[in-house]
Each structure stands twice: as structure tokens, then as C-alpha cells.
Image (cartoon, rainbow, N blue to C red):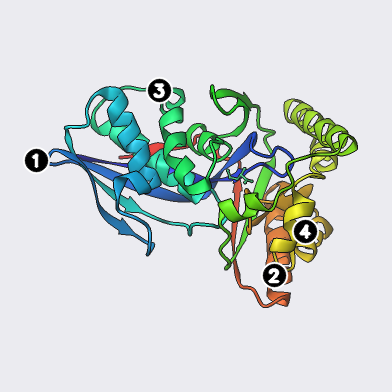
Amino acid sequence: MEVKAFAPASIGNIGIGFDIMGLCIQRPGDQVVARHSSTPGLRITEIRGATGLPTDIELNTAGLAALRLLEHLGATDMGIELEIHKKMPSGSGLGSSAASAVAGVMAVNALLDAGLSKKELLPFACMGEQIASGGLHADNVAPSLLGGIVLIRDNHTFDIVQFPVPPALYTVVVHPQLEMLTKTARAILRPEVPLKTYIEQSANIAAFVSALYTDDYDLIGRSLQDVIIEPQRAGLIPGFHAVKAAALAHGALGSSISGAGPSVFALCKGAFIAEKAGKAMQAAFSAVNISSTIYTSPVNIEGAGIIL
Ligand code: HSE
């Protein structure tokens, strides 16, 4: 018997909520197959769709997340094989390592019929993801697992708030063919925030959250202005300012860096504007000789699941 789990990509930070907010998109997404084996212990037998990722359980985000779950269940002696199907590159800003960790715990939970809820699985997925990103922050893991738009009030107790999703809210993420390690993109950040900047950012976050409850698309646009992280990371992404300007010029409500980058996202009202904004963003990357892939989707309110 085997089970296959799917965990979607996500937009960490949503621009303004560094390490505390994330949004789940429909695709791409990673898959993990878990199956019983007669050899005791957990093993990764195959990683498809990526080269260079570790098959050592302790070094692989899906493997470590699954191991932490098995430890919790007292089931580390069980023979379990994992097969990881990567559908997005690492270092993309799409929450790739988080998606693998989420799919890993979902698959093992289902294989063993352990019955943990998604919220109960969250800490184990975060422990797995932590080895890739260098910090314990659930802004990709939580939306990938639970779906929707989430706030992580506390990254240590995993106090999660799920927001309502305005019905016409559409996302576009443009992934340039560059790799950016989250650890690198975090290392450049200044540890202090000036008081004036803090005031601006907290006003934007509060207004953004209010807009989600009231379906106020214009307010979503006005609030999606990251005055803390984006100015520090923009220089790491060739063409970033032109890509963002292209999104806004084609009707996007707002645009910023997806997770730690280099992907750039925009939030839009409706699919038509998202398609147009995505093409314009891609053209702006092309203008600096960078090819890219566009992903458009509504907010994915389902999150991770088992593929039957
Ligand atoms: N919040 C992280 C960062 C992204 O911006 O560094 C991935 O969790």
C-alpha cells in the first residue's frame, strides 16, 4: 500500500508580512509518495525532478519532517520509503522546500492512518523546512498545508490565523530562471527597523488584513507596500523594479517579492488582469535577458491534500 500527497507552492511574506504571512497558490506543487517497506526505518528511495537534493533523511526537508512526525508517533522503527517528486526548483521564492516538507508529513500521516489534523502536522513540517531556510518561520509551510491566506502570530507556538479570501482575488507569480538561497537573502537584511518605517509597515499590514475581511480590493493595493524588506532585497533580483512597474501598469493591485525571491508576485482582481500583468512582468524580465515562468491562480483555499 502507498499514498501520494500533494503540497502547493506559496507566496511567503505577501510582501508586507515578513516571516508572518503567507498565501497558498494552486500550482506548482510537490508530491511525496510514502509506502510501507519490510526494512525497518525511514528512507528516501528516489527524488524526481531535481538534482543535487540530499537523500539523507536528516538533510532533506521532506525526510526530516517525516522523521520528526514518526518520532512523535513512536514509529521510527516502521519500514517506510519516501519518493519525492519535485515540481519546482529550490531557491525560487515559491516555498519549494516547505512544499516538500508538507507533502512528507501529509503522506506519512495518511500512510499510517495516524489521524493528525493539519494544524497538528504543522510543527513537524516546519522542523523539516527549517534546515533549508535557516530559521523557524511558517510563512510558507502554513499556507501550503492549510491553504488560503494565513498569519503566523507566533512562529514558536504556531499560533495561526486564517483570513477570509476575497472571492475575486487572483495571484500571479513570475519565476525567473535564477536561484536565490533563502539563507543568502536573509543574511543581507539589517537587524534594525527605524521607528518611522515600523509605523508605515504596521499600518500597511493592519489595512491589508482589514481589506481581506471587507473585500476591499483598492485597499489591498494601497496596503501592499513593503517598506522594510523589499528595498533591501530588490537589488538581488535583476530587473525587479521594471517587473513590479509592469505589473502595476497592467492593473495589478500590488506587487512585491515572493518569499525570499527571486520570484515576483502580484495580486490582482480577476483572472484577466492577472494574465495580462503576468505577461508584462515576464516581458520585463526578458528585457534584462532572463527567461521566466508564469503561474496564475486564484488563492488556493484547500492547501495540501492526498491524491487518490
Ligand atoms: N520569510 C522568508 C524570507 C521566506 O523572506 O526570508 C521563506 O519562508
Q: Are marks 1 and 2 in contact (CB under 8 Å)?
A: no
Q: Nearer the viewer, residue 259 or 284?
A: 259
Q: For mark 1, does the 10 Å Cα neighbourhood hold few (<14), some (14 to 19), or many (20 or more) residues?
A: few
| Residue 285 falls left or right of residue 40 | right
The residues tagged by marks 3 and 2 sit, at their Cα atoms, a distance apart of 41 Å
Marks 2 and 4 sit apart, C-alpha to C-alpha, by 10 Å
Q: Which mark is residue 117?
A: 3
Please identify, in this view, whether the residue under mark 1 or under mark 2 is nearer the observer.
1
Which residue is under mark 1? 38
Q: Is residue 260 visible?
A: no
Helix, strand or loop status at disc 3 = loop
Which disc number belongs to residue 285?
A: 2
Q: Viewer-proximal residue, 55 or 13?
A: 55
Secondary structure beneath dot 2 equals: helix
Horizontal and vertical percent position of residue 115: 32, 22
Element on which disc 4 rests: helix
Q: Which residue is mark 4?
A: 244
Q: Is residue 168 above or below residue 290?
A: above
Badges 1 and 3: C-beta atoms under 8 Å apart?
no
The disc labelled 3 sits on which kind of residue? Answer: Ser
Q: Is residue 94 above or below residue 299?
A: below
